[in-house]
């Protein structure tokens, strides 16, 4: 599947946000005046900015993903292995959705066992 042109990511941000909010246990919050945050049990797993989306990735995938066009380490969150996607040049929309779902799983894995069981992990 060929990625769409770079400018099209902004057109899909609302769709990506709705996808993230539809994941089990997801909740929404507005932080830092412009960041639309999707969390699981108050642990962030996706950030939506006016022109990009950021989410947590597995440590082993971080370097490979940040080498793609339109993908960079997320400011202030790179040390926790977050990437910021600002275009669809390097990642197609289904790949970003899969990344958001995986980010939720990474956050879920760090929750207490009772909460993991509650969310079916």
Image (spheres, rainbow, N blue to C red):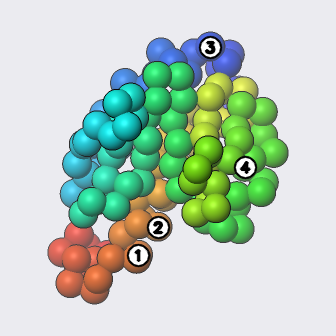
User: Of label 2 and label 4, which has the lower sequence position?
Assistant: 4
Marks 1/3: CA distance?
A: 34 Å
Left or right of 66? Residue 97 is: left
- State the SS at label 4: helix
Q: What residue is pinned by disc 2?
A: 106
User: Of label 4 and label 3, which has the lower sequence position?
Assistant: 3
- State the SS at label 3: loop
Marks 2/1: CA distance?
A: 5 Å
User: Of label 3 and label 2, which has the lower sequence position?
Assistant: 3
Left or right of 111? Residue 50 is: right
Marks 4/1: CA distance?
A: 21 Å
Q: Position of residue 89 (x, y in %)?
A: 72, 27
- Give the number of the disc on residue 109: 1
Q: What residue is pinned by disc 4?
A: 65
Q: Position of residue 43 (x, y in %)?
A: 34, 61
Q: What residue is pinned by disc 3?
A: 7
| Label 4 crowd bin: few (<14), some (14–19), many (20+), radius 10 Å | some
Residue at left 67%, top 18%? 6
| Label 1 crowd bin: few (<14), some (14–19), many (20+), radius 10 Å | few
């Amino acid at each position: 599947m060929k990625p769409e042109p770079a400018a099209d990511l902004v057109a899909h941000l609302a769709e990506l946000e709705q996808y993230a909010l539809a994941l089990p246990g997801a909740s929404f919050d507005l932080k830092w005046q412009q960041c639309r945050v999707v969390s699981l049990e108050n642990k962030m797993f996706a950030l939506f900015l006016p022109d990009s989306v950021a989410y947590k990735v597995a440590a082993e995938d971080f370097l490979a993903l940040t080498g793609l066009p339109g993908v960079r380490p997320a400011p202030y969150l790179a040390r926790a292995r977050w990437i910021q996607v600002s275009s669809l040049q390097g990642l197609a929309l289904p790949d970003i959705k899969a990344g958001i779902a995986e980010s939720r799983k990474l956050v879920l894995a760090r929750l207490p066992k009772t909460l993991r069981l509650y969310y079916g992990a």
